[in-house]
């Protein structure tokens, strides 16, 4: 196998990204989650071509990727959408995770001796805890790629749950690793409960604080290069995660809440920032899934006992543990129909997060760490295959789907629209026929859609009076004719968009 060296790092990385992007296109046509094929690319290259075995690096890259994914997911979520489902979403993200972990952990503890891999209850609970939360990357990616419309506020509920349930699973994993690791001291139950409360409270407070600080800074800093606003916000993402973790808060919760705050506030150059984070989110998802695929040992993965435990665990979690946890968690919320509850239990996708959590036992040399990692990997593949490919089909079968309205102009602004935007300053020659908008001589199929005057913006009417120095945003289908007209008016400094 080829070793990843400094000399061939960029070449290998470029090939992997290129193949992954092509796999994503194939996945879209086949109706398969792209993230599953990203994993497949990593497994293939790791088994056939490359030699990669660094759970520490994978864990580090996973933390960076999850920070960006959670922040981007929060930024794309409107608070007005999640407000009606805030309480059930939080309940699923906390109580639901705990119930899933203990139900699944008890099952694994009971079944493992029959499969020849007898596990103690703490190890079984650790294995279950790594898989207890739904994966934000998978849920955000699949729901938004498929543009799946859902009734009963199910989409914001699922996105809220997947974006905010990682902290509880993370704390469970860290606690159990601390108990089981030969290199660490055992933590008491009381201290663990205090740690959980502190992490959640500090994480929420830090996320809100950093989110507000990011909004204030971006709106006040006044940089001439619009691209730097995206870089500045990315710095805030890493600052939020690292500082929150440093003060014993939960960084994952903090970046998600910070994203919610930023996304629901007005910031300058927001379109540029959102576009930047969409691209970076896809990049880190691809890198993260490829690295996770590279890390897996196919020979260990295909051992009969490991494979059987993984398959049985996946089926039990999908058809028993997750549904029971969802039904119990959502029992107090009567407004959701039975079919809606069934759909929520079905869209409990597992993805990169469980695999990243499974690297913690590897790094800390917990007993059965290799088994835990491989079982989690098998469960993730089954979840993405079984549940990920049926997100739309199950919604239609249960009658909770609706057709999501798509913008007719979104792509037109970027690709197919022949009209062009231009910006010009009003001069005296332009106002010679009169000083109202309707008196200005412009070509047909040309509209003045906005006026900027002394920093104030407004949409003009025909009788709007213009003054020299006003800046006009003009949309026209007659671009060549308009450019010639600008020259006749002595308008040499024309800004094109």
Image: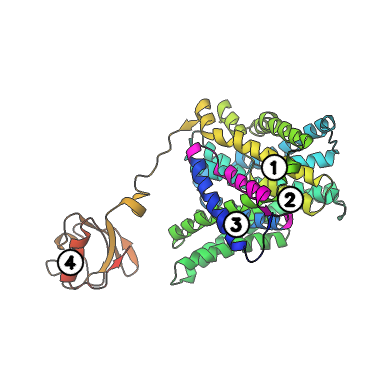
**Residue at the image point whose x is 71% and y is 45% from the top:** 169
What is the spatial separation of the Cα atoms under label 3 and label 2, in whole angstroms? 29 Å
Q: Name the residue under label 2.
A: 359
Q: Name the residue under label 1.
A: 377
Q: State the predominant SS element of the stretch in magenta.
A: helix
State left or right for residue 479 relative to residue 286. left
**Which sits earlier in the primary sequence, circle 4 or circle 1?**
1
* Camera-side mark, 4 or 3: 4
Q: Callout 4 environment at 10 Å: few (<14), some (14 to 19), or many (20+)?
A: few
* Place of residue 338 in the rendered image (x, y in percent of width and height, measured from the top left): 58, 26
* Place of residue 319 in the rendered image (x, y in percent of width and height, measured from the top left): 67, 29
Q: Callout 1 environment at 10 Å: few (<14), some (14 to 19), or many (20+)?
A: many
What is the spatial separation of the Cα atoms under label 4 and label 1, in whole angstroms? 63 Å
* Place of residue 426 in the rendered image (x, y in percent of width and height, measured from the top left): 23, 70
Magenta range is 29-56
What is the spatial separation of the Cα atoms under label 4 and label 3, in whole angstroms? 52 Å
Residue 204 shows in the view: no
- Residue contact at pointers 4 and 3, CB within 8 angstroms: no
Task: Answer whether residue 486 is magenta in the image.
Answer: no
């Amino acid at each position: 196998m080829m070793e990843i060296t400094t000399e061939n790092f960029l070449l290998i990385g470029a090939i992997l990204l290129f193949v992954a992007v092509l796999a994503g296109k194939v996945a879209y046509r086949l109706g398969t989650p792209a993230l599953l094929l990203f994993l497949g690319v990593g497994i293939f290259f790791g088994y056939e071509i490359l030699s990669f075995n660094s759970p520490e690096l994978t864990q580090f890259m996973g933390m960076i990727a999850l920070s960006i994914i959670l922040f981007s997911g929060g930024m794309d979520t409107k608070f007005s959408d999640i407000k009606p489902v805030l309480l059930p979403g939080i309940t699923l993200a906390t109580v639901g995770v705990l119930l899933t972990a203990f139900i699944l952990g008890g099952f694994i503890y009971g079944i493992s001796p029959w499969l020849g891999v007898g596990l103690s209850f703490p190890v079984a609970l650790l294995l279950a805890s790594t898989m207890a939360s739904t994966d934000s990357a998978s849920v955000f990616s699949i729901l938004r790629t498929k543009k799946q419309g859902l009734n009963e506020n199910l989409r914001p509920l699922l996105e809220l749950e997947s974006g905010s349930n990682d902290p509880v699973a993370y704390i469970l994993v860290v606690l159990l690793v601390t108990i089981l690791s030969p290199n660490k001291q055992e933590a008491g139950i009381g201290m663990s409960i205090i740690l959980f409360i502190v992490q959640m409270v500090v994480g929420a407070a830090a996320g809100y604080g950093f989110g507000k600080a990011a909004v204030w800074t971006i709106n006040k800093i006044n940089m001439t290069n619009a691209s730097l606003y995206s870089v500045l916000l990315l710095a805030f993402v890493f600052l939020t995660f690292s500082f929150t973790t440093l003060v014993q808060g939960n960084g994952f919760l903090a970046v998600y809440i910070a994203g919610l705050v930023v996304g629901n506030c007005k910031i300058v150059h927001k379109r540029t920032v959102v576009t930047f984070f969409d691209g970076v989110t896809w990049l880190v998802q691809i890198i993260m899934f490829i690295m996770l695929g590279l890390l897996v040992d196919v020979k260990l993965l295909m051992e009969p006992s490991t494979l059987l435990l993984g398959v049985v665990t996946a089926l039990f979690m999908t058809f028993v543990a997750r549904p029971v946890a969802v039904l119990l968690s959502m029992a107090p919320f009567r407004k959701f129909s039975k079919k809606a509850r069934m759909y929520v239990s079905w869209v409990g996708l597992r993805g990169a997060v469980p695999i990243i959590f499974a690297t913690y036992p590897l790094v800390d040399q917990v007993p059965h760490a290799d088994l835990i990692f491989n079982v989690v990997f098998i469960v993730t593949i089954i979840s993405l295959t079984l549940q990920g490919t049926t997100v739309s089909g199950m919604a239609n079968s249960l009658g909770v789907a609706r057709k999501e309205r798509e913008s007719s102009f979104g792509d037109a602004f970027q690709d197919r629209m022949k009209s062009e935007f231009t910006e010009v300053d009003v001069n005296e020659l332009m106002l010679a026929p009169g000083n109202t908008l309707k008196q200005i001589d412009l070509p047909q199929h040309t509209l003045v859609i906005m006026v900027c005057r002394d920093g104030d913006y407004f949409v003009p009417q025909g009788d709007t009076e213009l003054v020299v120095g006003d800046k006009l945003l003009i949309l026209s289908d007659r671009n060549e004719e308009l450019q010639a007209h600008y020259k006749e008016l002595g308008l040499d400094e024309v800004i094109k968009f």
